[in-house]
Amino acid sequence: MPKNRERVQQMSIREKIVDYSRGDNLGLFWRLFFMRKRTKSRLRKSVLAFWCGRLAHKHGGYIGIDADIKEIPSLPHGLHGVYISRYSSIETGCRIYQNVTIGENGRKAPRIGKNCLVGAGAVIIGDITIGDNVKIGAGAVVFMDVPDNSTVVSQAPRIIRKENEGE
């Protein structure tokens, strides 16, 4: 019996390693991220910050080590292209898609409310507040406060210049 138990444990470890090598498993990153927030030792904080940075880079994104994240956000596409400023604040229940930038302006960054959805390629920047239950559409650029229960979309496409058909 002990040999079978060891074999099952080895299989689960192998599966975890395969999952991690694909770049989809962010569990270790989030454990280190929240461990760093709880620790008091400056040396331990520095070491954990280093490993968090390396893991985020491996997954193709960046989350500032001092970002105030209340709960692990839903990242359907992983950290691919996601940039979250170290000064930003994200509440619980948020869903963030790929290539999103939550940037700072003069050490001031957005505060994002509960249950928000941020679409692919959106840019949220500056000292602004995004309310609760807000949906930000793909490609939207947000630089002003957004009230609760709102939807923000990018501008409608417009034609800058139309080529003459006869020429």
Image (spheres, rainbow, N blue to C red):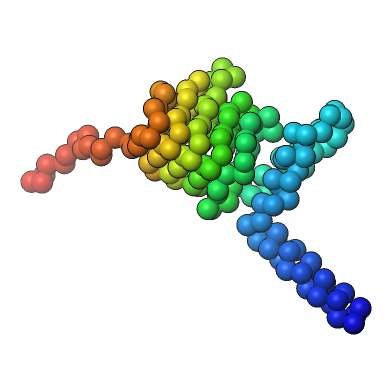
Q: Position of residue 55 (x, y in %)?
A: 71, 47
Figure label count: 0
In this rendering, would 112 be left or right of 36?
Answer: left
When the figure is inspected, residue 3 is found, relative to residue 91, above or below; the finding is: below
The reply to whether residue 141 is visible in this rendering is yes
The residue positioned 45% from the left and 42% from the top of the image is: 117
Near-viewer residue (35 or 144): 35
Near-viewer residue (53 or 148): 148
Near-viewer residue (155 or 94): 94
The residue positioned 74% from the left and 46% from the top of the image is: 31
Pick the quarter of the image with the N terminus.
Answer: bottom right
The residue positioned farthest toward the right in the image shown:
2
The residue positioned farthest toward the left in the image shown:
166
Picture quadrant where residue 7 is located: bottom right
The residue positioned 91% from the left and 78% from the top of the image is: 2
Pick the quarter of the image with the C terminus.
Answer: top left
Q: Position of residue 124 (x, y in %)?
A: 47, 31
Near-viewer residue (15 or 37): 37
When the figure is inspected, residue 88 is found, relative to residue 119, above or below; the finding is: above
When the figure is inspected, residue 29 is found, relative to residue 110, above or below; the finding is: below
Q: Position of residue 32 (x, y in %)?
A: 75, 43
The reply to whether residue 139 is visible in this rendering is no
In this rendering, would 120 be left or right of 14?
Answer: left
The residue positioned 57% from the left and 44% from the top of the image is: 73
In this rendering, would 166 be left or right of 138?
Answer: left
Q: Position of residue 5 (x, y in %)?
A: 86, 76
